[in-house]
Image (cartoon, rainbow, N blue to C red):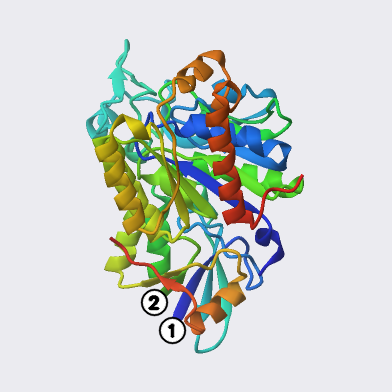
Amino acid sequence: MSDSTQQLKEIVVISGKGGTGKTSLTASFAMLGGDRIVTADCDVDAADMHLLLQPEDSISEPFFSGEAAVVEPDKCLGCGRCARVCRWDAFKQIAGGKYRVNQLDCEGCGYCARICPAGAITMVEQQIGHCYNSRIRNGGRMIHARLQIGAENSGKLVAKVKNDAKQLARDTGKQLVLVDGSPGIGCPVVSSLSGASYVILVTEPTVSGLHDLQRVAELVIKFNIPAGGIINKADLNPESAALIRRFLSEHSITLLNELPYDESFSSAMTAGKTVLEEGSPQLRQIIRNNWNTVCTAVCGGELNS
Amino acid sequence: MKLIITAANNNPQSDVDPRFGRAAWLIVHDTETGEYSAIDNSKNKSAPGGAGPQTARIVIENGASVVITGNGPGASAAEVLRQGKLKVFTGAAGMSVEQAVSAYRADKLTEFQPA
């Protein structure tokens, strides 16, 4: 085994469906991991783990992705070829007959820049948000990002957040990176899963909870990553919970735990805290046991300080 | 036969990059001559989208028959590789490129099953 990758492990928490409690649990795990881990929020489209962990003293860095067309008014002949080839209707003719790009409509394909006879259009790299390296209140560090209005998450941004978290972990001698993964099964979640040592699938006993779990579990199985499942709010629908249990067992996914429906998930969120801090002693114990089980599976024992 | 291994750096001692589409380098290994060469994949590593299929295209254009990586290509890249009739082997994360080639020869990697 090569040295640099042997020690560092990576746990990725995903759910497929939103609202299952994924981020609430990940934030609790981040509190348990303390300064022995680095936490990464790759759920960048709807980043909300910072609301629970309230990171401070952020070091920020702008993030660029994709390009958009910009017209140089002095060179524009007003011929309108750009507007005719644009599939997104991003060009508007302005007073004086020249053309201008609406940046929000531009997809960055570059066709206009290629065919402009006056060479008036250039493709400019877009800053779409910021990445942050911050401290959370238990002394651990967190890598996260914030997108600008209208910008979307991408495999690129997820890869950057994850790679930054891994680099920070290596530089500071941590053995584990905890990742709040992206939703769905597309590019960002593929990027979230790449390189994972273990995946925690958080689901709930609903029709869409099971459906989305099946879709994302298919990806995890194809990627050959060991996985464990948590059924949150398991007592709300015993029939659906039974279907989920059966699905997990048929696919050799360990059932890590079942959590009862608990209003402290909502009250913790409102208080800007984690369920680990706000929940009942029983709930805290379940979450603590979960974390220890996963750490043992991934690192061969509980995390060393 | 040519193997392509996703790698973090440009030589046979590099770590395997567990990512497919956004792998930093692609190392080509010719099993007949034993030679290694490297393809810079940084353009796809930082592509705003389509990194997987574009990397798959490079793999095909370089005449490889086998891809070795960590977890595997996503659905879109897997489809491109399938049409290019490539075999994909995963489970090489944590190995060096040379170790991954040995593991492939010893039949110790997992064949990736698209869909």
A195 relative to A39, above or below: below
Give the residue at x 46% y 18%. A266
Circle 2 marks a residue in which chain? B
Q: Is residue A125 visible?
A: no
A74 relative to A122, above or below: above
State the image quarter where residue B48 is shown.
Answer: top left
Give the residue at x 41% y 31%. A260
Give the residue at x 42% y 20%. A73
What is the three-letter code of the residue carrying label 1? Answer: Met
User: Could you say whether the residue bearing mark 1 is in a helix, strand or loop?
Assistant: loop
Q: Please state the horizontal and vertical placement of residue A155, each as a whole percent of the image.
A: 45, 44
Q: Is residue A72 visible?
A: yes
Q: Please state the horizontal and vertical placement of residue A208, each as a whole percent of the image.
A: 26, 36
Of the image marks 1 and 2, the number of the one nearer the N terminus: 1
**Residue underneath mark 2:** B65
Circle 1 marks a residue in which chain? B
User: Could you say whether the residue bearing mark 2 is in a helix, strand or loop?
Assistant: loop
What is the three-letter code of the residue carrying label 2? Answer: Ser
Q: Please state the horizontal and vertical placement of residue A268, each as a whole percent of the image.
A: 53, 19
Q: Is residue B5 left or right of residue A135?
A: left
**Residue underneath mark 1:** B1
Quick one: quadrant of the N terminus of chain A? bottom right
Of residues A65 and A283, the one drawn nearer to the viewer in this rendering: A283
Residue found farthest to the top: A95
Between the C-alphas of marks 1 and 2, the distance is 7 Å
Q: Is residue A234 left or right of residue B3?
A: left
Bin the neighbour count of mark 1 within 10 Å (Cα to Cα): few under 14, some 14-19, many 20 and up.
few
- Asked if marks 1 and 2 touch (Cβ < 8 Å), the reply is yes
Residue found farthest to the bottom: B32
